Image: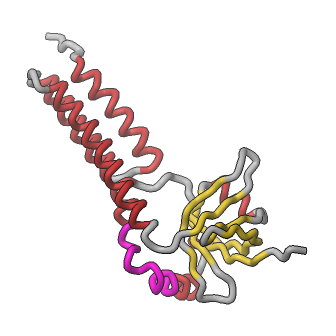
């Protein structure tokens, strides 16, 4: 007997496709869990249809959205509970900005920038940036290093300096990337900031 394409099954298919696209872009346990739960309910609605199927599938979508919003709010509020600066990178399509942490233990301040590939290419090509800190915007030239290409001897001191300042909230990065994922193709850069002279 042919199974009827019910509203619950149609919604389940749409959600499965949406979650699959998100997983392809960034991964994340929240979206994997939502995809598997939706697929399981879709199978149930085909094998043993019931009056609660549509509400059940809808509840998974709502739960995923609430989880995403709640986790994001918690992560961003934790990130902003310590010193954060705004980094602006000039790009052809307009300025790219990001909020990130900054370290001061060396001769020049430095930051970790988890950059989109096009922003990483611009910085590696020598683009200058501006950093807004305590309401003051300063232009900088940057000495760029690819974190993944650094040796343990090079990266360990940086990591120690980072933990000395931000260790109490570092856990939130694992929460964010573990539960909500990380956009594919991003590049972790270490930017050493060198202030540009007015002249």
Name of the residue lying farthest toward the right: 199
- Report the side of 126 relative to 56 (left or right): right
Residue 132 within the magenta-colored segment of the rendering: no
- Relative to 182, say whether 60 is above or below: above
Residue 167 within the magenta-colored segment of the rendering: yes
Closer to the camera in the image, 19 or 95? 95
- Report the side of 62 relative to 174 (left or right): left
Q: Residue at horizontal 24%, vertical 23%?
A: 9
Q: Residue at horizontal 9%, vertical 22%?
A: 50
Q: Residue 157 lies in what quarter of the image? A: bottom right
Q: Residue at horizontal 29%, vertical 40%?
A: 35
* Percent position of residue 194, x then y: 74, 78
Closer to the camera in the image, 2 or 92? 92
Report the quarter where the C terminus lies. Answer: bottom right
Q: Residue 143 lies in what quarter of the image? A: bottom right
- Relative to 38, say whether 158 is above or below: below
Q: Residue at horizontal 77%, vertical 62%?
A: 127
Give the image's coloring scheme: secondary structure
- Relative to 141, say whether 181 is above or below: above
Label total for image: 0
Report the quarter where the N terminus lies. Answer: top left
* Percent position of residue 117, x then y: 63, 55
- Report the side of 139 relative to 81 (left or right): right
Q: Residue 151 lies in what quarter of the image? A: bottom right
Q: Main secondary structure of the magenta part?
A: helix
* Percent position of residue 128, x then y: 76, 65
Q: Which residues are magenta?
A: 159-172
- Report the side of 108 relative to 68 (left or right): right
């Amino acid at each position: 007997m042919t199974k009827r394409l019910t509203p619950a099954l149609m919604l389940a298919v749409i959600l499965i496709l949406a979650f699959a696209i998100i997983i392809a872009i960034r991964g994340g346990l929240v979206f994997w869990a939502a995809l598997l739960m939706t697929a399981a309910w879709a199978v149930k609605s085909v094998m043993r249809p019931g009056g609660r199927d549509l509400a059940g599938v809808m509840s998974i979508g709502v739960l995923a959205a609430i989880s995403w919003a709640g986790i994001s709010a918690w992560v961003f509020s934790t990130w902003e509970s310590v010193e954060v600066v705004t980094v602006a990178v000039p790009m052809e399509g307009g300025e790219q900005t990001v909020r990130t942490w900054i370290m001061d233990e060396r001769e020049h301040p430095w930051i970790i920038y988890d950059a989109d590939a096009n922003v990483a290419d611009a910085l590696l090509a020598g683009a200058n940036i501006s950093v807004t800190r305590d309401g003051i915007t300063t232009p900088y030239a940057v000495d760029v290093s690819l974190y993944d290409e650094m040796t343990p001897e090079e990266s360990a001191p940086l990591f120690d300096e980072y933990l000395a300042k931000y260790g109490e909230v570092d856990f939130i990065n694992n929460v964010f990337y573990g539960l909500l994922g990380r956009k594919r193709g991003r590049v972790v850069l270490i930017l050493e900031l060198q202030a540009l002279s007015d002249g």
